[in-house]
Image: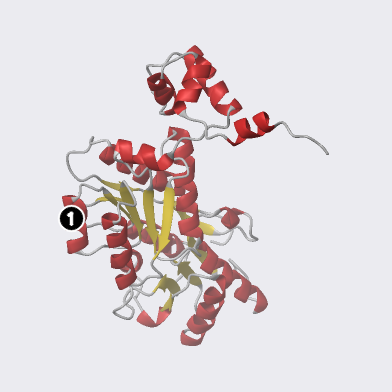
Amino acid sequence: MPTTNSGSVAESMKHVTMQDIATRAGVTKATVSMVINNDKRITEATRQRVLKIVKELNYYPNESARKLAKGKTESIAFVVPRFGSTFIASILDGFEKRTYETKRYLNGIQPYSTRNEIAAREEILRKILFGHKADAVVLLDQTPSRKIVSEYQEKNIPMVLIETKTTGAHSVRVDNIKGAYLATSHLAQKGRGKIGMIVGISKQDPIYEENPVTEERLQGYQKALVDNKLKFDRDLVATIENYDSTEGGECLKQLLKKDPDLDAIFCAAGDIVAMGVMEEARQRGISIPKKLSLVGFDDILAARLVTPGLSTVRQSFGEIASAAFDIAMDSIDGKLAKEKHILLEPELIVRESA
């Protein structure tokens, strides 16, 4: 009958403690703790010796105990209207990159989806706050109620808004009015006189979030028309809900029914929707940009890969994410005495579609 080395098995199954690491490395338990917590007072030689033993023994800190001792959750809540969005995915990607650059909150970004519902948002935010689930919360395209903001202030949990702004919370926004103005003015200056717009629905059912970005881009579009001596026609504004390419094709159909002389579209609803316009135009034999000029919004990677290349308004996902992450870190560290608001500049990127 085969025998087993019971001592080796027992040793491999043993729960390794911080003291075991300290004994093997010939240092104190406090030194091991400082190494694990990346304390800068530890010499590089000691750090490497301890980390080598940590790896050899497959040691993983007791996260629950460590978080309790530090009084931190080591998580940042990221609350979004929905997960199926290129824009949201790009911002989350920027957040992830920033955690690795700073070595803070690695694998600590916790996403939540509200499906655009106000009640769901308020419930999620209260669960995060009163369940002690995060050291800070970041909200994208949403404005929490005054009561929720006050509750977060009372608990000293930082709140950072992306794309919206309210008293009591930090914010990072892109100048959407300017971005829409640049896009529409460019089309007008190219000699286009029937410029349609595709944009998200701003006022929906009362249970859903209102989108301030939609209103800002509509303002920029209208101002550009006036400044370029063009008439604003509400019939030339088409709205979408889900921000997918199929809706772009449907919007082109609707706009052409309203005005067969349509010669340009500013797709404020994003590049993905604009690509739906391009596909529908192709199927109808409408040449872009000869018969129809098109400008999107976002400047996702695919915008420069499609044919023709999509002109668009660039908003830097990385810059937005980094700014929001850094504000959250500074606030957690107690470095911000008052609210911080950042307004980023958009950039018009001209390619073949316009």
Q: Which residue is drawn at 47% across and 20% down?
A: 22
Front in this rendered view, residue 185 or 159: 159
From the image, tell me which residue sits under label 1. 167
Disc 1 marks a residue whose amino acid type is: Thr
In this picture, is 62 found above or below 42?
below
Q: Residue at x 34, y 75 (%)?
A: 231
227 to the left or right of 53: left
Residue furthest to the front in view is 1
In this picture, is 219 found above or below 323?
below
Front in this rendered view, residue 13 or 107: 13
Q: How is the image coloured?
A: secondary structure
166 to the left or right of 215: left
Residue furthest to the bottom in view is 257
Q: What element carries label 1?
A: loop
Residue 208 placed where, x, y %?
A: 33, 75
Q: Residue at x 57, y 53 (%)?
A: 301
Residue 306 placed where, x, y %?
A: 63, 59
Residue 90 placed where, x, y %?
A: 49, 53
Residue 173 visible in the displayed image: no
Q: How many marks?
A: 1
